[in-house]
Each structure stands twice: as structure tokens, then as C-alpha cells.
Amino acid sequence: MLAKEDRAGGLERMLLASVHASTFATAAAVLDGHTARWRIGEFHRAWKRGMCNVEQTQQRGREALLK
């Protein structure tokens, strides 16, 4: 599926999907899923390695749990 922004100098991307987008509604759903994928990835990156640093705050042993 070829996705192109409707503005001067807009981005153009070729998306490979396992869904056959035979209608505009199906193509829009595939494109929405693709854009959500990047937002979710950025959220997980910030959660694990950013300011949240969740991996360092996990309680891995009995002593940490008791604190």
C-alpha cells in the first residue's frame, strides 16, 4: 500500500501489510495501526530507558520486596 501525505512536500511511504486493503476504510485502518505502532514503541522506550527507568525499579528479591 502506498501512503502519501496530501500537502506540498509531504511524505510518501510504501507499507507492507498482511491485510489486503481493497477499500479506503481498510487502508485507513492499516495506516492507523502503523502510526500507533510507532507511538507504542516510543512509549516503551521511554518507560524502560528514559526518565521512568522501570527496569531498575523492579523488585527482584525478597529483601527489595520487604523494603
Image (cartoon, rainbow, N blue to C red):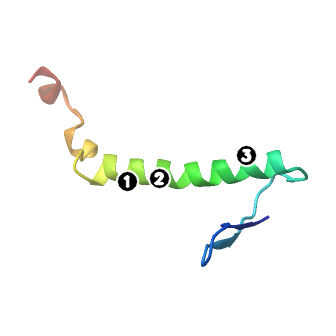
Disc 3 element: helix
Point out the tag, 1 or 3, that comes first from the N-terminus: 3
**C-alpha distance separating marks 2 and 3:** 18 Å
The residue singled out by tag 1 in the image is 45
Disc 2 element: helix
The residue singled out by tag 2 in the image is 41
Question: Are the two marked residues, 1 and 2, in contact with CB atoms closer than 8 angstroms?
Answer: yes
Vertical side of 51 occupied by 66: above or below: above
Q: Residue 15 location, x and y as percent?
A: 72, 65
Judge by depth and name the residue closer to the eye, 29 or 6.
Answer: 6
Q: Residue at x 63, y 54 (%)?
A: 34
* Quadrant occupied by the N terminus: bottom right
The type of residue carrying mark 3 is: Ala
Report the residue that reaches farthest toward the left: 67
Q: Residue 47 location, x and y as percent?
A: 32, 46
Binning the other alpha carbons within 10 Å of mark 2 as few (below 14), some (14 to 19) or many (20 upward) gives few
Q: Residue 54 location, x and y as percent?
A: 27, 42
**48 relative to 60 in the view: left or right:** right
The type of residue carrying mark 1 is: Arg
Question: Of circles 1 and 3, which is in front?
Answer: 3
Q: Residue at x 63, y 70 (%)?
A: 7
Question: Are the two marked residues, 1 and 3, in contact with CB atoms closer than 8 angstroms?
Answer: no
The residue singled out by tag 3 in the image is 29
Point out the tag, 2 or 3, that comes first from the N-terminus: 3
The type of residue carrying mark 2 is: Gly
* Quadrant occupied by the C terminus: top left
Q: Residue at x 48, y 47 (%)?
A: 40
Binning the other alpha carbons within 10 Å of mark 1 as few (below 14), some (14 to 19) or many (20 upward) gives some
